[in-house]
Amino acid sequence: MASCSDFTIPSKIKAWVYAELGNPNDVFKLASDVEVPEIKEDQVLVKVVAAALNIIDAKRARGFLKDNDSPPPIVPGYDVAGVVVKVGDQVKKFKVGDEVYGDINEVSLIRPKQHGTLAEYTAVEERLLALKPKNLSFAEAASLPMVIETAYEGLERTHFSPGKSILVLGGTGGIGSLVIQLAKQVFGASRVAATFSTGKLDLLKSLGADLAIDYTKENFEDLPEKFDVVYDAVEGDKGSEGRRKCGDNSGGPVTPPAFKFHVTSKGSILEKLNPLLESQIIKPVLDPKGTYPFSRVLEAISHLETGRPTGKIVIYPIP
């Protein structure tokens, strides 16, 4: 394995850890004696500079994945932006010193890594990473991987093509804000409508929405127009309502033509989208409360679980 004298890798690091399931505010503990993860031949060791929170982090701690999870103790976190400090023997794409970003779990809901990104160092397969866009800060880059890959994969799965219309439920959230941008700028949507809550109209318009629907004042089900695709980016039970806007009146559980999916992390998608990020055609959206330092992860995850953040919540700086 290769490493570099420019980086001194400690034997013990700081990380957020939980050893039992429950409310994150009760079970998350900040530890200072966590082992640095060993890397496999196809992995790199990343010095974490920033990490983003996702709702799955909270749901995982509460036992949502208990039948398909890694054994405790668990270091949570999926999204990372940082610097490569060590590479495995089979790694070809990255070298020590490269600034990278990615979602470290290839399959989001099946045995995600025991050691995640809310730590000073994390290990990740090179195929899940891409070079960080040069114009983005580490915090901005960390906000992107899971949500931009989810947005992109969802649009691909619908076979979205130029000229189609789309309704995005939850247009100012982490996923929804990127669905709007990708649908408009990459997939050639002819019309993008999106729901939002009061006070977020300007953001929605800046993202490229043609029609903004304040769900606190009007019901999108009452719109006279139908859409080729409805992308439900909201946690909750709005999906069956949204499906009726594309001609599916079944209600209840998801039935064709509607479908659910869980994202598969691919560094190749990030590589494909990097030029659009570097040219600022696609922009990350961070919660206006700003980044949270490593010591305030509990406060950040409480804000996440309210369901009211705009864009993404990022932990920065780490440590």
Image (cartoon, rainbow, N blue to C red):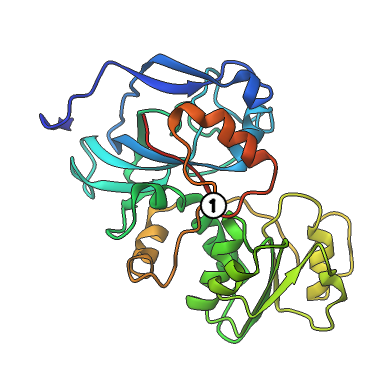
Count residues near mark 1 (Cα–Cα under 10 Å), then give few for <14, some for 14-19, many for 20+. few
Residue 96 sits in which quadrant?
Answer: top left
Q: Residue at x 57, y 28 (%)?
A: 298
- Does any portion of residue 265 appear in the rendered image? no
Q: At which x and y percent is residue 139?
A: 40, 47
Identify residue type, mark 1: Pro
Say which residue label 1 marks. 288
Give the residue at the far left of this rendering: 5
Q: Is residue 162 above or below residue 94?
A: below
**Which quadrant of the view contains residue 223?**
bottom right
Can residue 48 be spotted in the picture?
yes
Q: Residue furthest top?
A: 33
Q: Relative to residue 249, is residue 308 drawn left or right?
A: left
Residue 91: x percent and y percent? 24, 42
* Image point (83%, 76%), residue name: 247
Q: Residue at x 72, y 62 (%)?
A: 198
Task: Determine whether, in the image, residue 165 is placed left or right of residue 136.
Answer: right
- Name the image quarter holding the C terminus: top left
Q: 185 left or right of 165?
A: left
Decide which of 19, 90 is in the foreground and name it: 19
Task: Determine the secondary structure under disc 1.
Answer: loop
